[in-house]
Each structure stands twice: as C-alpha cells, then as structure tokens.
Image (cartoon, grey):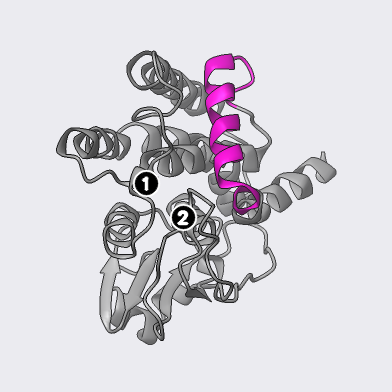
C-alpha cells in the first residue's frame, strides 16, 4: 500500500516535473537497457516526496527508459481530482500508464518495467532463484522497512505539521525502537555476506529500501549514522545509480534544509 502525504500537512515544496529521457542508451553502461521500444512514451504519475515514487523515478532515470513524469502534488490534493481518480480509484501514487495499460503500486510497476523494457537483468533477474530473492525482500519490505521508516517521518514531520502541536515523544521512541529492529534485520539477513540486499548486484529491492531509509532525513534524522554496514550499502546504491539518486531526493533535501533553517 502506497503512502500519501495529506493535503497541507507538509510545507509547500516546488512542483517538479521531468522531461522524458531522449538520449540513446549507452551500450557500454551496464545499468541501461540494450534496446528500447521506439515511438512510445511511458507516463508515470509521481510526487517525489513519496518514497515509492522515488524508487520508480530512479529506475527510469538510471536505465534511460523514455518516459514522461506527470507531477501529482499530494499536498494540494491532486490525487483526489476526478481525472486522477479515473486512473487510480485508490487515489495513490505512483501510477504508470503504458499505451493505455494502467498499473499502480510501486512493486508491481518496478517489476513490470524491468520485465518488459529490456533493462539489464540484474535489476530483476530472470533466474528463478535470484528472482525469488528479490521477491522475498519486496514481500518483507511492505511490513517492515516501509512502515517502520515511514512512521518516524510521520511522527516527526507530518503529524506535527497537521496538528500544529509538538512531537509525541513516547510514540516516536517506540517507532524508533521498531525501526532499529528492522535495520538489524537488514544487516543480519540481507547484507550479512553480500554487497546488495539480494546478492552481488543492485536490484529493485535496493531502490525500494534505500528510498524508505532516506525518508526520516526529511525531519533531519539520519537513521544510519551509527550503522557503518548500512552506510556502506547506501553508498554502493548511490554509486550504482549516480546522479539519479540526488535528483530523486532533491525535494526531501529541500524539506530537510527548510526545517533546519527554522531551528
């Protein structure tokens, strides 16, 4: 289930839109597809304050899949318009439209794109055992990394912005404790003997995870500061995706910087 920022809950950030990637893929780049279908432009509806939207945007930007970003400003209630509700009655982002085929949920979108678009197979390996490892993480992700990291952001940023009240420190302490347990599992289960969550190469699992782990940074909290193993993993992910990482997180960085300036 994807998370929506409630209208008016977070200070306004500049609307962002992105032009389609038009340059040909570099055949020497292992993270880009060998070929792409001509004459078709994929549409994705995104708000980059949403973690799952950032994962989709990073994959699209890094692989060079031609696409058009349709910005959905959740804080303005764009997701509740009649036009958007026709696309996704659940009124959530991300949404993908591919030649009239509409798909929701970031996990499904990432797997569709990596299966259909001819991207390098390491993103979502075709081998049954390697693919199962990615599926194993993404199944675990939705009840662990995603809710636990998001809750910290909600309690430190979203709820106080909605209510105008202080942070509920007791609830935040419990949320941080739950998140610590999840980070422990990431280290002991998924990163114990390998550089990325599902093996020796980056996959869509790493994109989903890193975007969630970055979210508390919007409130000025670096949840990896005392976790060198996870710090090294994040650095590897960042290096693998290049400038797409910071571009996707620019809205989050802006939120962090504005909050810091008010302290």
- Residue 27 in the image, given as x and y percentages of width and height: 50, 58
Give the residue furthest to the left.
128
Residue shown at 69% from the left, 51% from the top: 255
Q: Is the C-beta separation of discs 2 and 1 under 8 Å? A: yes
Q: Does the magenta stretch include residue 218?
A: no
| Residue 231 rendering spot, x and y as whole percentages | 59, 23
Q: Which residue lies furthest to the front in this view?
A: 28
Residue drawn at the location 41% of the way across and 61% of the way down: 34
Give the class, few, some or many, for how many residues have Cα within 10 Å of label 2's Cα (few <14, many ≥20): many
- The stretch of residues the image draws in magenta is 223-245
Is any atom of residue 227 visible in this view? no
Numbered mark located on residue 38 in the image: none
Residue 104 rendering spot, x and y as whole percentages: 29, 65
Label 1 Cα crowd, 10 Å radius (few <14 / some 14-19 / many 20+): many
Residue 78 versus residue 173 in the image, above or below: below
In the image, residue 95 sits, relative to residue 176, either above or below, namely below
Provide the major secondary structure of the magenta segment: helix
Q: Is the residue 234 above or below the residue 58 in the image?
A: above
| Disc 2, SS | helix
Question: Is any part of residue 241 visible from this angle?
Answer: yes
Q: Which residue is drawn at 72% across and 52% down?
A: 254
Residue pointed to by mark 1: 123
C-alpha gap between disc 2 and disc 1: 9 Å
Is 75 in front, or is 61?
Answer: 61
Decide which of 81, 185 is in the foreground and name it: 185
> Which of the two marks, 2 or 1, is nearer to us in this view?
1
- Find residue 156 and report its image quarter: top right
Splitting the image into 4 quarters, where does residue 118 fall? bottom left
Q: Disc 2 designates what residue? A: 59
């Amino acid at each position: 289930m994807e998370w929506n920022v409630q209208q008016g809950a977070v200070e306004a950030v500049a609307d962002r839109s992105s032009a389609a990637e038009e340059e040909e893929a570099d055949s020497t780049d292992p993270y880009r597809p060998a070929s792409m279908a001509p004459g078709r432009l994929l549409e994705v509806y995104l708000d980059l304050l949403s973690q799952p939207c950032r994962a989709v945007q990073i994959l699209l930007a890094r692989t060079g899949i031609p696409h058009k970003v349709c910005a959905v400003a959740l804080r303005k209630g764009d997701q509740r318009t009649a036009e958007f509700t026709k696309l996704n009655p659940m009124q959530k982002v991300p949404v993908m439209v591919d030649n009239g085929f509409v798909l929701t949920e970031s996990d499904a979108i990432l797997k569709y794109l990596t299966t259909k678009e001819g991207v390098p197979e390491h993103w979502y390996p075709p081998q049954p055992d390697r693919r199962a490892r990615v599926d194993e993480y993404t199944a675990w992700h939705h009840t662990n990394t995603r809710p636990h990291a998001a809750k910290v952001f909600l309690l430190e940023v979203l709820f106080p912005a909605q209510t105008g009240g202080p942070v509920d420190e007791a609830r935040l302490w419990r949320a941080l404790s739950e998140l610590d347990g999840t980070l422990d599992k990431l280290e002991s289960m998924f990163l114990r003997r390998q550089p990325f969550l599902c093996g020796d190469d980056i996959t869509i699992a790493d994109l989903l995870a890193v975007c969630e782990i970055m979210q508390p940074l919007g409130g000025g909290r670096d949840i990896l500061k005392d976790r060198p193993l996870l710090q090294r993993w994040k650095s590897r992910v960042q290096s693998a995706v290049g400038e797409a990482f910071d571009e996707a997180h620019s809205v989050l960085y802006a939120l962090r910087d504005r909050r810091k300036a008010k302290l």
